[in-house]
Amino acid sequence: MAIEIQNLNVQGMSCQHCVHAVKSSVSALAGVDSVDVSLEKKLVTVGFDPGKTSLKAIATAIEDQGYSVVQ
C-alpha cells in the first residue's frame, strides 16, 4: 500500500468545530491514513491509499460538510 500525500486548500473553515467536521468526514473514507487540518493556512493535508479512495472523493467529503475545496 503506497500512501499518497495531498494538500487541499479549503475555504470556509474558521473554528475547531470546522476542523473536527473535516477530520471526521475525511477519516471515515476507506483508505484514508491521516488527516491534518490547519485553520491558519486553510489547508487540509491528507494521506491516503489511491487504490481505495480518490482525491475527488476526499474533496467531496469536505464539500459535503459545507466547505469549498479550491484548486
Image (tube, rainbow, N blue to C red):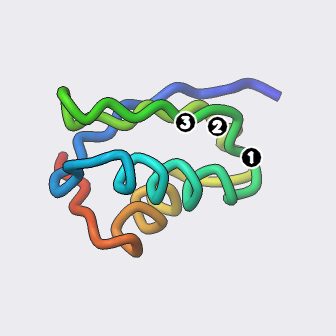
Residue 2 located left or right of residue 5 = right
Q: Give x and y (percent) for residue 51.
A: 74, 46
Residue at x-position 25% and y-position 35%: 39
Residue at x-position 64% and y-position 37%: 48
Residue 40 located left or right of residue 54 = left
Q: Give x and y (percent) for residue 59.
A: 40, 58
User: Is tag 2's residue or tag 3's residue first in the polypeptide sequence?
Assistant: 3
Q: Nearer the viewer, residue 20 or 50?
A: 20
Against 24, is 31 above or below? above
| Residue ID for mark 1 | 31
Against 20, is 44 above or below? above
Amino acid marked by disc 2: Phe
Which mark's residue is nearer the viewer, 2 or 3?
Answer: 3
CB under 8 Å between discs 1 and 2: yes
Q: Hey, which quadrant is residue 40 in on the image? A: top left
Q: Secondary structure at mark 3?
A: strand
| Residue ID for mark 2 | 48
User: Is tag 1's residue or tag 2's residue first in the polypeptide sequence?
Assistant: 1
| Residue ID for mark 3 | 35
Residue at x-position 50% and y-position 56%: 58
Q: Give x and y (percent) for residue 1.
A: 83, 28
Amino acid marked by disc 3: Val
Kindly give the residue lying farthest to the front in the view shown. Answer: 16
Task: Count every numbered label the image shows and give the total.
Answer: 3
Q: CA distance from mark 1 to mark 2?
A: 5 Å
Amino acid marked by disc 1: Gly
Q: CA distance from mark 3 to mark 1?
A: 12 Å
Q: Secondary structure at mark 1?
A: loop
Q: CA distance from mark 2 to mark 3?
A: 9 Å
Residue 27 located left or right of residue 16 = right
